[in-house]
Amino acid sequence: MTAGPLAGVKVIEFAGIGPAPMCAMLLADLGATVLRLDKAGPPTAGMKRPLKYNLVLRNRHSITVDLKSAEGIAFAMELAKDADAIIEGFRPGTMEKLGLGPEAFAKINPGLVYGRMTGWGQDGPYAKMAGHDLNYIALTGALHAIGRKGQAPTPPLNLVGDYGGGSLYLAFGLVSAILSARTTGLGQVVDAAMVDGAASLMTSFFGLHAGSLHSTERGTNILDSGAPYYDTYECADGKYLAVAPIEEKFRAIFFKRLGLDAAEFDNGQAGQEKMRASIASALKTRPQAEWVAHFDGTDACVAPVLSMEEAPRHAHNMARKTFIDVDGIVQPAPAPRFSVTPAATPTPPKPADHDVPAALSNWGMSGEQIEKWLSHTQTGQNKP
């Protein structure tokens, strides 16, 4: 039996790039049976990499399907009869042109949830335009808010748009709609747009801004490096510490451990600049490891800034098994954690058509249905 709280949930993933595969991974990590329908040939978009390093493809089977053929469309429809949800991440109208839009699936499975992942959304002036993470978060105010004073906005990897505003919101939307469908018997379309998700992530800051508590000038607010007690500082060995004692009681601990007198620094600009310079000067006197040992076990809110090589080896991450090794590839473990239905150890990414009979059997197809599909493909060598 599949482990995880989503065991028994079936999801069809129409192969795409970016946030859609990440969403599928999140569901599969938590036990959903996800079947990826892939295109023939090499990928035409996205970052090229060996399959074993494309970790968002873990935990599921992939089958090559020609969605421009009658057989491919019929096969997708057959799968959908037993599916709880669909994930697709194409431009609006693409699936409809293939005859695979929400209305077509609703006719054969009224309870099916149809998840649509786009940057701009299914409608609006930009809906038909191409774009990437940076474009989407630029439109929401998020990108403008990230960066240091006097400097250009800083791209925050593709964490805010693709994965935070995209993958996570689509996964949340799909699970919510599946719960609704199990109560009402009716599926629905989940329109997950990265502009909407990124804007939602900015909710708190829009509230602060409305109350004149957060300036639109980058690097002048508490959480954007404007506060000297919420920033990164270089140590003697060139490595960095993340310093974040926002509350006064925690700052008192930080200053005491650092050997500084908090009373020396007022809240004016000169006082804050003096505080920043004093913290920087003090932290530059020892290497990172010594400071970590010095602050460990306190409420000073100090942590080492770790690289991707270092993070899996940190004692806290090791104790919690935050990172795991799967076939020699160190990667983040499934999250979050569940006390009664824990997730299983992920399986590595599989090439398309790795084991079609097993994939379709796991889906619930009969031997006759599997044989019928194999007879229409070039994967006959995978027959049992």
Image: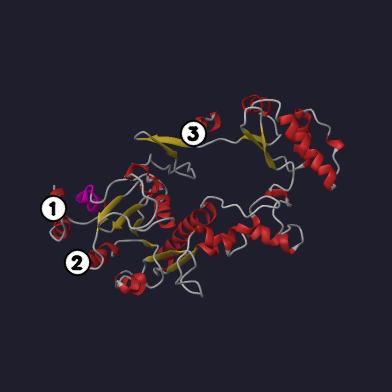
Left-right relation of 43 to 357: right
Q: Position of residue 75 (x, y in %)?
A: 23, 64
Which residue lies at the image location 60% right of the left edge and 52% below the top edge? Answer: 154
Q: Which mark is residue 380?
A: 1
- Where, quadrant-wise, is the N terminus in this rendering? top left
Q: Secondary structure at mark 1?
A: helix
Mark 2 or 3: the one toward you: 3
Task: Give the mark nearest the N terminus, 1 or 3.
Answer: 3
Amino acid tagged 1: Gly
**CB of mark 2 within 8 Å of CB of mark 3?**
no
Find disc 2 in the rendering and name its residue.
Answer: 71
Q: Position of residue 359 (x, y in %)?
A: 25, 51
Measure the alpha-carbon separation of dots 2 and 1: 15 Å
Measure the alpha-carbon separation of dots 2 and 3: 46 Å
11 in the magenta segment: no
Left-right relation of 102 to 352: right
Amino acid tagged 2: Glu
Task: Give the mark nearest the N terminus, 2 or 1.
Answer: 2
Q: Position of residue 363 (x, y in %)?
A: 27, 54
- The crowd level at tag 3 (other Cα within 10 Å; few <14, some 14-19, many 20+) is few
Amino acid tagged 3: Glu
Q: Position of residue 67 (x, y in %)?
A: 26, 65
Q: Which is more toward the observer, 2 or 183?
A: 2
Q: Which mark is residue 309?
A: 3
Q: Which is more toward the observer, 113 or 311?
A: 311
- The crowd level at tag 1 (other Cα within 10 Å; few <14, some 14-19, many 20+) is some
Which span is picked out in magenta?
354-361
Q: Quarter-wise, where is residue 256 in the image?
A: top right
